[in-house]
Image (spheres, rainbow, N blue to C red):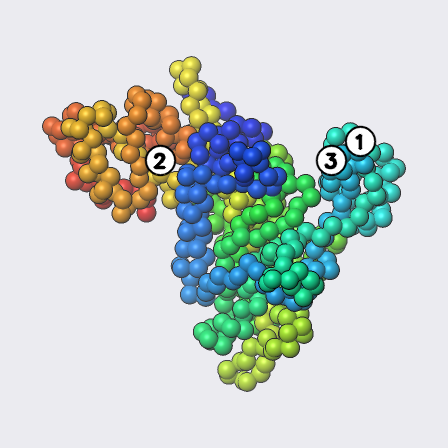
Amino acid sequence: MSTKDSKGNMEDIVSLCKRRGFIFSGSDIYGGLAGTFDYGPYGVALKRAIENEWWKFFVDNRDDMLGVDSAILMNSKVWEASGHVAGFVDPLVEDVKTKKRFRADHLLEDNGVSAVGMTIEEMSAKIKELKLKSPDGNEVGEARIFNLMFETSAGATQDSASRIFLRPENAQGMFVNYKNVIDSIHPKLPFGLAQIGKAFRNEITPRDFTFRSREFSLMEFEYFFDPRIGNWSELFEMWRGEMYKWIEHVGIKKELCHEIEKAGPDLAHYSKRTIDIEFNFPFGQKELYGLAYRTDYDLKQHEIHSGVSQSYVDDQTGEKFIPHALEPTFGIDRTILAVLTSAYKEEEIEGEKRIVLSFNPKIAPVQIAILPLSKKDELAKPARDIINKLRKIGRVMYDETQSIGKRYRRQDEIGTPYCVTVDFETLVDNEVTIRDRDTMKQERVPIKDLEEYFAKKLA
């Protein structure tokens, strides 16, 4: 048996995602809409499993974390205070012939020139100097600034007073609710506010499948602490370690991850320290997760712009101060792409190709497949009875079409860790055959022991 590394096989992963119902292009029957994607039945099962595991890992299993779910639409003053209205921009160039728009920094980087720290004028000059063309081979115009936020109107009229934005990040929803949580729940520092939800960025050139899209989902939290203690670096290292534990827990190959310390022009104005955890995607090493020490920048900005105090009162001394925040950020779509990349493999067995998604059983879209050897009622009925028993243990499905070999291959492709075959011997000995996805080994297990067997396997 030989195994082919998935690295560099983005086309294989994209093809599998569509063929097996994981991810489709948005508005596919109308030719799609760039930067949008729809999750199919197995994709949404994978996505929800990852979200549930993340929430359990970072929120439910801790005493210092609370959850919120803020609105996507927020008062425009939120984004003025955070600096997004003035500063959430990308450099843009336009193809003079086709009028298509492209990221100026990406155009430079694709031609071996780093645009880090360059002004918009310097980018324009460098593009002219190198006589760079658009990806379509045409001349491009001057580089200019492009705001990434999607803008819309609230209410019946369309004027400046009704202007609002789709949120470009989830963080501000937690910062503006910090005061509400303090007043209603009275948590003690340190504590975190966690949120899972959609965010939107009007990317000039969405690309690399779901990696850079216009609509995406984030899992993140703001961890508030007392800056007077002076232990921010210890907390930073603690969350850094937890992020790597999560990476292994969810099934991302740690050896494909790289840590990048942000510095100079790469360091955001609100951050005292930021690290990016990058991953070897098939299209290159790109950012997967981030950890930033945002200090008290956001709460201070909202206090200034709203006039509402964001202070925390020390119940021992009565002293007031504004907490600082650490922010671990996890993109769900990028997590799924990294998990798919880590799990995807091709094996050659006796001249036949086997494609496998070796998901961690905890996040597999289907954890147990029940396969009656025949469609006849004498096997279908006990198979259905087994499904009803196992639904409370994990995510199960029933599959009776095609030969047992083809069904095994189909389950391998969607990442099902265990297949349970109900055969004619089952009618005699009340036992079934369980096949392991990764080893392909089979064992006979009594039906009466299945619930205990899978409870241990999926724990």
Q: Amino acid at mark 1?
A: Asn
Name the outermost residue toward the bottom.
Answer: 318
Quote the CA–CA distance across marks 2 and 1: 50 Å
In primary-sequence order, the first of circles 2 and 3 is 3
Which element type, helix, strand or loop, lies under badge 3? loop
Q: Amino acid at mark 2?
A: Pro
Q: Is residue 85 left or right of residue 431?
A: right
Q: Which residue is mark 1?
A: 138
The crowding category of the residue bearing disc 3, from other C-alpha atoms within 10 Å (few below 14, some 14 to 19, many at least 20), is: few
Q: Which residue is mark 3?
A: 110
Report x, y in % for residue 179. 54, 73
Picture residue at 85% right of the left edge, 35% below the top: 130
Residue 450 seen from this side: yes
Picture residue at 31% right of the left edge, 28% below the top: 441
The crowding category of the residue bearing disc 1, from other C-alpha atoms within 10 Å (few below 14, some 14 to 19, many at least 20), is: some
Residue 256 seen from this side: no
Which element type, helix, strand or loop, lies under badge 2? loop
Picture residue at 87% right of the left edge, 38% below the top: 128
Q: Nearer the viewer, mark 2 or mark 3?
A: 3
In primary-sequence order, the first of circles 2 and 1 is 1
